[in-house]
Image: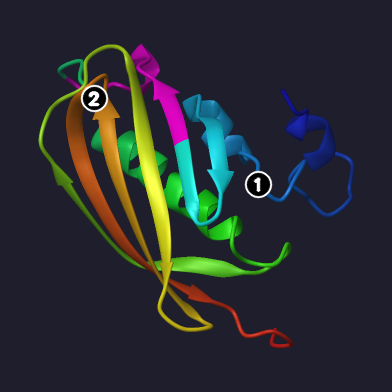
Amino acid sequence: MYNYEAEMNSGQQFQLPGWISCAPFEEYLGMQIEESGDGRAVLSMPFKVKLAQGVGLMHGGAITSLADTAVAMAIKSILPEGSDFVTVDLHLKFFAAVHEGTVRAVARAIPQDERKIVGEAEIFNGETKVAEFNAFFIVKRRGTT
């Protein structure tokens, strides 16, 4: 695991260990990048009690984070390294609760033009579809601050 703590306290600007890699928040949630390339990504995240809500089910925010991150990795696989982009709108529809196992997000990026990208992901727990995710992303114009 990358030592973010040391880097954050080094006084230097924070950088990820690689263009397609998990950030500290994503590592905290236990996300793993299984694959990323050609506008597609698959990420997984195990159920952990620390990710549960009040009745012991995986928190919807954790599942949303997995889906958003999976789409971001799919987008990174088609953009030049160092590109800046942000999620500006997202929707998640839940179909099943998660109380054990590992959730997996299968994502794809669908470019609309040079600055607009639609992202989609399906989230599974085993063979059970847990949720569907749709989002809209904007890529920052090059040369702007």
Give the residue number, with chain letter if any, for mark 1.
20
Residue furthest front as drawn: 38
* Residue 92 x, y percent position in the rendering: 21, 50
Q: Amino acid at mark 2?
A: Gln
Mark linked to residue 133: none
Residue 83 falls in image quadrant: bottom right
User: Is label 1 in a helix, a strand or a loop?
Assistant: loop
Which quadrant: the N terminus? top right
Q: Position of residue 98 (x, y in %)?
A: 21, 22
Closer to the camera, 142 or 24?
Answer: 142
- What span is in magenta? 43-54
Residue holding disc 2: 53
Name the quarter where the C terminus is drawn. Answer: bottom right
**Near-viewer residue (68 or 78):** 78
Describe residue 53's horizontal placement relative to residue 40 as left or right: left
In the rendered view, would you say 138 is above or below 7? below
Earlier sequence position, callout 1 versus callout 2: 1
Name the element at disc 2.
Answer: loop
Name the residue type under label 1.
Ile
Q: Nearer the viewer, residue 102 or 24?
A: 102
Instruction: Determine which quarter of the picture holds residue 36.
Output: top right
Residue 49 among magenta residues: yes
